[in-house]
């Protein structure tokens, strides 16, 4: 969702609404191709799933532990650089992988 690892619920919600509005299948429009509509549906599903995880305290804590390990419980993430790197790559391993920013 392109939010900081330290983003609070307000930031997450703002970004979710922005992305959901942009990628909602109804917002794509009737002039879109079938491919554009399918891509929009997939992005909308991903954004909605990310919001469901990041907006729930228990799920967010579990996600943070998976991504950040033991450093998730500390005030400063020990691997913030890794988080920023993967956030920019969209979870992809190299810049040659397909990536579409949400």
Image (cartoon, rainbow, N blue to C red):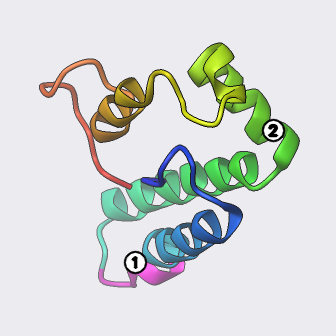
Q: Is residue 58 magenta?
A: no
* Position of the C terminus by quadrant: bottom left
Q: Residue furthest left?
A: 96
Badge 2: how crowded within 10 Å, few (<14), some, or many (20+)? few
Q: Is residue 28 magenta?
A: yes
Identify the residue under disc 2.
59
Task: Locate residue 17, reporting x and y percent.
Answer: 58, 75
Q: Real-space Cα distance between discs 1 and 2?
A: 30 Å
Which secondary structure lies at badge 2?
helix
Q: Give the magenta part as a residue range.
A: 26-31
Pick the residue in front: 25 or 60: 60
Q: Is residue 55 left or right of residue 28?
A: right
Residue in the picture at 32% in, 25% down: 92
Identify whether 90 is placed above or below 2. above
Residue in the picture at 72% in, 27% down: 73
Task: Locate residue 28, reporting x and y percent.
Answer: 40, 77
Identify the residue under disc 1.
28
Q: Which mark is residue 93?
A: none
Badge 1: how crowded within 10 Å, few (<14), some, or many (20+)? some
Q: Quadrant of residue 97?
A: top left
Q: Residue furthest front?
A: 75
Residue contact between numbered discs 1 and 2, judged by CB atoms under 8 Å: no
Task: Locate residue 24, reporting x and y percent.
Answer: 52, 72
Which secondary structure lies at badge 1?
helix
Q: Is residue 74 left or right of residue 89?
A: right
State which tag comes first along the sequence, 1 or 2: 1
Residue in the picture at 39% in, 84% down: 29
Residue in the picture at 30% in, 30% down: 85
Q: Is residue 12 left or right of residue 78?
A: right
Closer to the eye: label 1 or 2: 2
């Amino acid at each position: 969702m392109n939010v900081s690892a330290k983003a609070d619920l307000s930031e997450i919600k703002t970004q979710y609404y922005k992305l959901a509005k942009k990628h909602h299948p109804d917002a794509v429009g009737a002039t879109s191709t079938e491919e554009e509509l399918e891509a929009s549906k997939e992005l909308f599903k991903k954004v909605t799933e990310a919001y469901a995880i990041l907006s729930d305290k228990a799920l967010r804590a579990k996600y943070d532990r998976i991504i950040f390990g033991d450093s998730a419980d500390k005030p400063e993430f020990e691997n913030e650089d890794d988080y920023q790197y993967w956030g920019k790559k969209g979870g992809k391993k190299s810049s040659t992988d397909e990536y579409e920013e949400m």
